[in-house]
Image (spheres, rainbow, N blue to C red):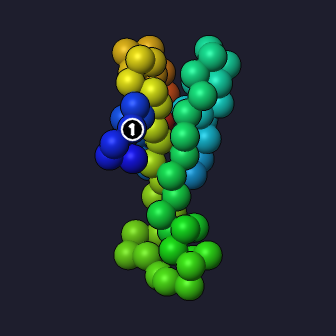
Amino acid sequence: MTDSNYIKVFTGNFINVQRISDKLKSIGINAVIKDETESARLAGFGSSIPGLQELYVNKDELDRAVLVVEEITSESRN
């Protein structure tokens, strides 16, 4: 995703990525989830860090998305 209008806003486990993705969707932001582990598994390869996913949003929605990521991650720490 280097030559696109999408930028990575979060890397984490499945549960946190889903929580953030659901919240983003509820405010009209369609995020893209990239799961290298699943891609490698489907291709017949292994992955060094299983379970981590990356969450990307359109650059135009970055400011709103970052606020959601900060909100969810701060809730997770408490």
| Residue situated furthest front in the rendering | 3
Residue 17, above or below 64: below
User: What residue appears at the point 55 percent right and 33 percent down from the top-left corner?
Assistant: 31
Q: Nearer the viewer, residue 68 or 29?
A: 29
User: What residue appears at the point 51 percent right and 52 percent down from the top-left corner?
Assistant: 34
| Residue situated furthest left in the rendering | 2
Which type of secondary structure does the marked residue at label 1 adopt?
A: loop
Left or right, residue 17 beside residue 47: right
Residue 50, above or below 67: below
Q: Nearer the viewer, residue 2 or 38?
A: 2
Circle 1 residues within 10 Å: few <14, some 14–19, many ≥20: few
Marks counted in the figure total: 1
Tag 1: residue type? Ser
Residue 64, above or below 43: above
Residue 59, above or below 8: above
User: What residue appears at the point 60 percent right and 28 percent down from the top-left corner?
Assistant: 30
The x, y position of residue 58, in whole percent, is 45, 27
Residue of label 1: 4
The C terminus sits in image quarter: top left
Toward which corner of the image does residue 62 lie, by quadrant? top left
The x, y position of residue 3, in whole percent, is 34, 42
Q: Is residue 9 visible?
A: no
| Residue situated furthest bottom in the rendering | 44
Q: Is residue 5 visible?
A: yes
Q: Nearer the viewer, residue 68 or 41?
A: 41
The x, y position of residue 32, in whole percent, is 55, 40
User: What residue appears at the point 64 percent right and 24 percent down from the top-left corner?
Assistant: 25
